[in-house]
Image: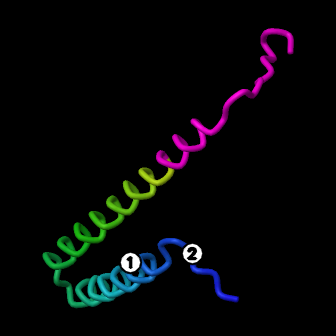
Amino acid sequence: MKINTPGAEAARYLRTFLGAHTDRLRAALADKDRGASAVELAVITAVLVGLAVAILAIVVTFANKQGTAIQGTNVPNPAGGG
């Protein structure tokens, strides 16, 4: 039985995309093409920042949904004596 995890296709695409750019970066570094390597690093950094923002948005959305789902629970207060 195969389970389709959400975002698996996007993660596979991102991995392929970053792999291709990493290979180009390595080739540029080997050829001493410093201008191209700076551009490649900027592109890779932008992609990683975008990915981090997307993950943060997912976590915040999940936390907000779970926070509204918690109702009628009593949380003990250790500072107040239990």
62 part of magenta stretch = yes
Left or right of 33: which side holds 13?
A: right
Q: Which residue is drawn at 67% across and 31% down?
A: 71
Report helix, strand or loop for mark 2.
loop
Give neighbour class at mark 1: few <14, some 14-19, many 20+ (Cα, 10 Å): some
Separation of marks 2 and 1 at Cα, in angstroms:
15 Å
Q: Which residue lies at the image location 46% right of the left edge and 54% below the top edge?
A: 58
Q: Is residue 47 magenta?
A: no
Say above or below: 68 vs 21: above
- Who's the residue at 27% across and 89% down the image? 30
Q: What residue type is labelled 2?
A: Thr
Side of 14 where 35 appears, left or right? left
Q: Where is residue 55 in the image (x, y as percent from the top left)?
A: 45, 57
Q: Nearer the viewer, mark 2 or mark 1?
A: 2
Tag 1's secondary structure?
A: helix
Name which of mark 2 and mark 1 comes first in the sequence.
2
